Amino acid sequence: MFGQFILNLFIAALWFLLKDDPNASFSTFVAGFFIGIFILYAMHRFFGIQFYLRRVLKVIKLILLLIQELILSSLSVLKQVLQPQLNITPGIFTYETRLRGDWEITVLALLLTLTPGSVVMEVSEDGSVFYIHAMDIEESKETVLKSIGKFEQAILEVTE
């Protein structure tokens, strides 16, 4: 994947250098970069790996999912904080994950800890079980489980 990006930069640099324009600017390089994207997309089957922009789009999707979940969980916490009486029952639950790589498990734990109302307290030694503290176990357990499922799927898409 990284090699395709470097090759794309090389194509853009060649376009910039070989363009017969004495006043070449950054827009010429950008045009060469887009031409390189089209060339690499047409030839990506010969590389034997996935086209690199697909992974970039999946990373952007993961970031947008994080922002969405962050906003939704922040609103939930804000609703709890603004109530006159604190009506929550905090608790701990476990979640068994499908992720296996150290990087994948770390990213999932960080994403869950970033969302308000839930904290990953511990991960088992083999990395298959998360111990999660939820602000309101009755209400937020289901939403946290849905978030975990979305995060897991997005992380699997990025790492495959």
Image (cartoon, rainbow, N blue to C red):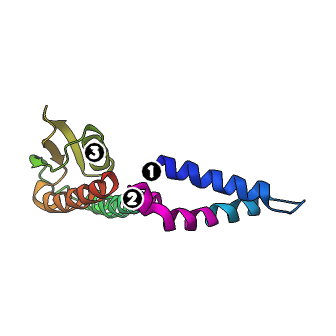
Q: Are marks 1 and 2 in contact (CB under 8 Å)?
A: yes
Q: Percent from the top left, x then y, of residue 22?
A: 90, 59
Task: Decide if residue 13 is on the left or right side of residue 133.
Answer: right
The residue at the point 16 percent across, 38 percent down is 127
Q: Tell me, for residue 1, which label it has, or none.
A: 1
Q: Quadrant of residue 156?
A: bottom left
Residue picked out by circle 2? 50
Q: Amino acid at mark 2?
A: Gln
Q: Percent from the top left, x then y, of residue 76?
A: 28, 62
Q: Amino acid at mark 1?
A: Met
Q: Nearer the viewer, residue 26 or 111?
A: 26
* Lower position in the chain sequence, tag 3 or tag 1: 1
Residue picked out by circle 3? 104
Furthest-top residue in view? 125
Q: Amino acid at mark 3?
A: Glu
Task: Please state, as top left, top right, bottom left or bottom right, where the C terminus lies in the image.
Answer: bottom left
Q: Is residue 60 something that shows in the picture?
A: no
In this picture, is 110 found above or below 17?
A: above
Q: CA distance from mark 1 to mark 2?
A: 7 Å
Eye-nearest disc, 2 or 3: 2
Furthest-front residue in view? 46
Q: Nearer the viewer, residue 58 or 142?
A: 58
Provide the secondary structure element on which disc 3 rests: helix
Task: Decide if residue 105 is on the left or right side of residue 18.
Answer: left
Task: Decide if residue 118 is on the left or right side of residue 39.
Answer: left
> Magenta region: which residues?
35-59
